[in-house]
């Protein structure tokens, strides 16, 4: 505590102050002093007056005035999102769990004991996945529903070596409700209040029960006999009938030996479910200043107070919330003492007045060091001194770890919300009528363009206030929600010229996007429930009517967003990123996305028409808007797995619309960023190829897209196509090859010839084998088919097969793709290469070629026969080792090779030596008989493909990180960059003399100009004529020289 440093000095002061000082004696001075300078004894000559001086009185303490203090309440944090799937639950929890800016450790959060499965580092979101029967789920069966209950537990750990935590433990219940009798609840779409049916039903509507259940939680346990070590499954429930939906809590629960809850013995195992607050009482000094009967003995008064934010008064409330900062002031009142400077040697916080009690947290130690910030990373710190007798410091609020009782914040209602149900119902009706009348009244008001500043400000305030109301009533009443949005958009457009630069366009756009996506989610959930119920007559069921209402809301929000974007597009630059995300999110909920929920095709098509058609119109409006293009084409934009295919489809849709756009929009999407000052932006061609590469999961499933025939001429960018061909992903390279061939086919013949030469140069510059060479060879073989015969002959002349440096080009070519003249030139240049190419192409050999080929093959066969005795024994070992390889891709190729070998070989002993184990025999037999051993489910297949996707992407990144990119050699027929002219010595002399003469003539021109006065003398003209004659002679001499 603060007093530990000063406790000993206080004791000594107490002793010295407690001594009764003798009263002084007064006497006249002696007239002289002895020579020895010793004091002589004096006698009292007369009476002495009593001393009347007293110690000064302590001034009265001024009373603290009443201050207007309001306790800041913490804001609720929307930090948990839940999706209930058909056989599992998906939970996302923000790391900023309490909304205070402090990120929680993932290890301290669990879903029923299961840890974090994944983490979105960019969004600071922790992701949990669980099957419905796992992670400590509880199954509760009601008459109408199956309810799976999960709990999100947050158990904060002590900060490093301290006993404190700066966040409260929390337990949040997550429930997934599934209907049992094919009925769908409309609670999310109807007002939260439901009128009572009758007074009689209301009086006995709430029936509470406490039952001991069986292990599966479906029935009441018929026996009350338990053995020590067993677990009792106790269920508390309430039947609400026609009441508003209720949530039951158990405030306290006791166990007794009889039915009397007050009898003994009694054991309370559920209690104390109140709200936990952090009190500053624990920070009050545990020492009490020593009080004496003498005023002088308590002249030094120490105090430790919690102050208000302005440091002027003592804080009247000791209630703090975690995340708040405590303003603490240590001071000393010195009165008539000499000036003092206060220090705090050490300071501890305890749960009670006893400074030695546990738990205890020392946050000032080592003779005045504030160690809290060092240990816990808090914002605690000392403040600069304003007075020597005051020391101010700030301490971030905390609580002791042992104080957590695990109380849920929702317990504060204690089930008493139903007591005010009637009042809430009446209040909602009155508020509904009031808002409706207010909107009708405001709609009748018309402001002119000359409206005053105050009138315009009032309209803006009304629009913003109604926007805030929309976020509250979104789940209470559909009609009120839609009418409010209609009024907001109508008034915004009505007074557009007056309010367009004052409205919070970003907030309005974000709210519309959120409402649209929420409505789509609700529709899909209703469609899933209809599918799970297995209804035959979908159109006539009540659930379908709810789906139609929800679809109507989706159509309304989508059209409203399109209308608002059209009117205020110039003010929506900051909202383009949200528009982009909304487009991707909505398309990810529809097929062909692999993440789309399974819903009936008819319902999916109905919702698709209601939502995707307006979204396509919105995309058309935003094509010419630069901020939207920068958001879509941003190279740093990282899509999650489920948004990769929607991003690719978005870019393909943009390509289909560009032909009808103006030239500026076409350049915006086609050129990409040109200068460093611009925001980084891909071209749309490069973005399509990059997004296609990221769709590895969809390509592996695969997904089927509807074919679209586009009009117009071929457009392309060689740089983007070449970058795609040279990357490690083979399917992306094949797609770029297809596009390149399309470009060569519908482009000019000269362009195709130029591309073939470019590819040939790149192949020739490749340092060795690699995926780049394989992709370039594939492109070369396909482009050779598209060349004209004239260009094929010219290509053979430029890349002669007889030259060794061109062999790497021709070994990837097919002779049958060349015309007759070009083929003959290849055979003449390199007879062996021509034979090999003709054999590969399946053509008949000429007589001379046939003799040469037979000779070469005979030589090769003789060499192979001599080593045959060494090759065959190793073949079985090679097959045996590869057939046990863990890689499925290698295993598949080895099985194919072994099957072909077994069909054509005469060496049966190799086969018997290879099939030495039952495992290898089973693999080979299953492959040859095309038997599938394990039939995996669709979910397991998707999970497997996701795992493979991560492995393949990592492998491709490793390949691309290696420095094996081909060197781009410039084509010989292209003009080289202009070089500086290398001049000779004579030319340098000419240049120097001519520059001197030119400079002199220009200077003379400025003197003899028409504006110059006086005019030059006559001799100047004579000299100029002489110079002109001299220049003519020099010019004539230069022309006559050969």
Image: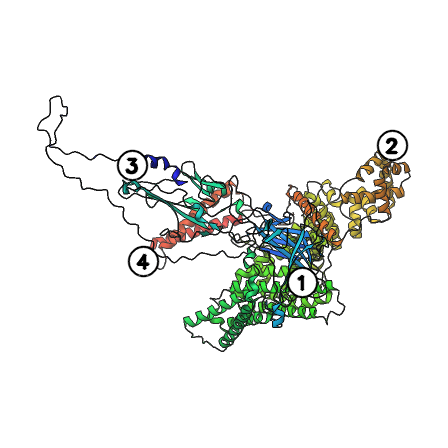
Tell me whether the residue at label 2 lies in contact with that at label 3, contact meaning CB atoms closer than 8 angstroms: no
Classed neighbour count for the residue bearing mark 3: other residues with Cα under 10 Å, few (<14), some (14–19), many (≥20): few
State the separation of the CA atoms marked 2 and 1: 69 Å
Per the image, label 4 sits on a secondary structure element best described as loop
Residue at which label 1 appears = 525
Above or below, comparing residue 765 to residue 734 in the picture? above
Which is more toward the observer, 905 or 1004? Answer: 905
Per the image, label 3 sits on a secondary structure element best described as helix
Q: Name the mark nearer the viewer: 4 or 2.
A: 2
Residue at which label 3 appears = 18
Above or below, comparing residue 268 to residue 864 in the picture? below
Which is more toward the observer, 797 or 728? Answer: 728
State the separation of the CA atoms marked 1 and 3: 83 Å
Name the image colouring. Answer: rainbow
State the separation of the CA atoms marked 4 and 1: 96 Å
Classed neighbour count for the residue bearing mark 1: other residues with Cα under 10 Å, few (<14), some (14–19), many (≥20): some
């Amino acid at each position: 505590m603060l007093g530990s440093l000063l406790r000993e000095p206080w004791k000594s002061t107490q002793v010295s102050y407690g001594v009764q000082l003798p009263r002084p004696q007064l006497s006249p001075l002696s007239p002289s002093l002895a020579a020895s300078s010793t004091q002589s004894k004096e006698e009292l000559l007369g009476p002495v007056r009593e001393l009347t001086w007293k110690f000064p009185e302590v001034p009265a303490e001024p009373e603290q005035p009443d201050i207007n203090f309001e306790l800041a309440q913490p804001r609720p944090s929307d930090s948990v999102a839940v999706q209930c799937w058909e056989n599992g639950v998906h939970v996302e929890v923000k790391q900023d769990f309490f909304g205070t800016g402090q990120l929680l450790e993932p290890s301290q959060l669990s879903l029923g004991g299961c840890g974090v499965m994944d983490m979105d580092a960019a969004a600071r979101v922790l992701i949990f996945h669980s099957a419905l029967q796992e992670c400590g789920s509880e199954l509760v069966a009601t008459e109408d529903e199956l309810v799976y209950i999960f709990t999100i537990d947050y158990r904060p750990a002590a900060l490093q070596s301290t006993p404190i935590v700066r966040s409260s433990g929390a337990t949040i219940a997550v429930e997934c409700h599934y209907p049992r009798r094919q009925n769908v609840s409309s609670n999310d779409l109807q007002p939260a209040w439901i009128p009572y049916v009758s007074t009689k039903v209301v009086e006995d509507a709430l029936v509470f029960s406490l039952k001991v259940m069986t292990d599966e939680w479906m029935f009441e346990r018929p026996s009350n006999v338990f053995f020590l070590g067993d677990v009792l499954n106790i269920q508390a429930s309430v039947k609400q009938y026609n009441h508003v939906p209720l949530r039951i809590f158990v405030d306290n629960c006791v166990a007794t030996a009889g039915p009397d809850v007050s009898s003994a013995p009694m054991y309370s195992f559920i209690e104390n479910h109140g709200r936990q607050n952090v009190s500053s009482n624990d920070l009050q000094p545990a020492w009490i200043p020593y009080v004496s009967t003498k005023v002088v003995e308590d002249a030094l008064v120490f105090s430790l107070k919690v102050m208000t934010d302005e440091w002027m008064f003592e804080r009247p409330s000791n209630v703090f919330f975690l995340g708040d900062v405590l303003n603490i002031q240590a001071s000393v009142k010195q009165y008539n003492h000499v000036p003092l400077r206060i220090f705090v040697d050490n300071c501890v916080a305890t749960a009670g007045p006893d400074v030695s009690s546990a738990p205890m947290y020392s946050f000032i130690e080592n003779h005045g060091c504030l160690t809290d910030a060092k240990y816990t990373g808090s914002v605690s710190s000392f403040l600069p001194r304003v007075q020597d007798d005051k020391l101010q410091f700030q301490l971030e609020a905390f609580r002791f770890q042992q104080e957590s009782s695990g109380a849920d914040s929702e317990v504060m209602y204690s089930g008493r919300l139903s007591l005010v149900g009637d009042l809430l119902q009446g209040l909602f009706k009155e508020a509904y009528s009031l808002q409706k009348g207010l909107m009708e009244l405001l709609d009748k008001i018309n402001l002119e363009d000359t409206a005053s500043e105050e009138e315009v400000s009032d309209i803006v305030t009304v629009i913003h206030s109604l926007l805030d109301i929309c976020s509250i009533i979104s789940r209470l009443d559909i009609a009120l929600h839609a009418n409010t949005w209609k009024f907001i958009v109508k008034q915004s457009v009505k007074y557009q010229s007056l309010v367009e630069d004052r409205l919070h366009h970003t907030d309005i756009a974000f709210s519309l996007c959120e409402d649209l996506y929420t409505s789509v989610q609700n529709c899909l959930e209703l469609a899933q429930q209809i599918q799970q119920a297995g209804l035959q007559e979908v159109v006539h069921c009540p659930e379908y009517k709810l789906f139609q209402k929800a679809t109507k809301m989706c159509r309304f929000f989508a059209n409203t967003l399109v209308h608002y974007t059209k009117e205020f597009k110039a003010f929506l630059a900051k909202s383009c990123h949200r528009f982009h995300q909304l487009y991707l999110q909505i398309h990810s909920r529809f097929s062909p996305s692999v993440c789309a929920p399974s819903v009936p095709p008819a319902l999916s098509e109905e919702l698709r028409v209601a939502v995707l058609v307006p979204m396509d119109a919105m995309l058309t409006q935003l094509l010419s808007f630069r901020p939207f293009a920068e958001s879509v084409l941003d190279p740093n934009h990282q899509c999650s797995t489920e948004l990769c295919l929607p991003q690719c489809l978005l870019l393909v849709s943009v390509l289909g619309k560009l032909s009808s756009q103006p030239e500026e929009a076409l350049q915006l999407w086609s050129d990409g960023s040109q200068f460093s000052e611009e925001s980084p932006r891909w071209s749309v061609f490069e973005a399509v190829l990059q997004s296609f590469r990221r769709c590895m999961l969809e390509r592996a499933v695969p997904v089927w897209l509807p074919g679209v025939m586009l009009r117009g001429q071929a457009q392309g960018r060689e740089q983007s196509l070449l970058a795609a061909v040279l990357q490690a992903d083979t399917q992306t390279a094949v797609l770029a090859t297809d596009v390149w061939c399309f470009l060569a086919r519908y482009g000019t013949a000269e362009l195709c010839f130029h591309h073939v030469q470019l590819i040939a140069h790149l192949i020739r510059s490749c340092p060795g084998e690699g995926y780049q060479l394989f992709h370039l060879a594939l492109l070369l073989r396909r482009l050779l088919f598209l060349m004209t015969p004239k260009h094929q002959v010219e290509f053979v002349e430029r890349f002669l097969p007889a030259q060794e440096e061109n062999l790497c080009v021709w070994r990837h070519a097919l002779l049958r793709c060349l015309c007759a003249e070009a083929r003959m030139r290849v055979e003449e240049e390199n007879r062996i290469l021509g034979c090999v190419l003709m054999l590969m192409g399946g053509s008949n050999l000429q007589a001379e070629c046939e003799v040469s080929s037979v000779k070469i093959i005979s030589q090769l066969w003789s060499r192979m026969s001599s080593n045959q005795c060494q090759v065959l024994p190793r073949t079985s070992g090679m097959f045996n080792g590869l057939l046990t390889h863990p890689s499925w891709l290698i295993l598949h190729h080895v099985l194919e090779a072994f099957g072909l070998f077994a069909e054509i070989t005469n060496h049966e002993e190799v086969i018997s030596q290879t099939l030495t184990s039952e495992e290898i025999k089973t693999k080979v037999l299953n492959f040859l008989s095309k038997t599938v051993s394990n039939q995996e489910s669709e979910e397991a297949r998707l999970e497997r493909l996701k795992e493979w996707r991560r492995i393949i992407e990592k492998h491709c990144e490793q390949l691309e990180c290696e420095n094996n990119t081909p060197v781009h050699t410039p084509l010989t027929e292209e003009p080289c960059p202009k070089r500086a002219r290398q001049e000779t010595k004579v030319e340098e002399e000419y240049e120097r003399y001519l520059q001197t003469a030119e400079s002199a003539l220009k200077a003379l021109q400025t003197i003899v100009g028409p504006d110059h006065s006086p005019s030059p003398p006559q001799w100047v003209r004579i000299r100029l004529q002489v110079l002109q004659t001299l220049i003519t002679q020099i010019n004539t001499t230069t022309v006559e020289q050969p």
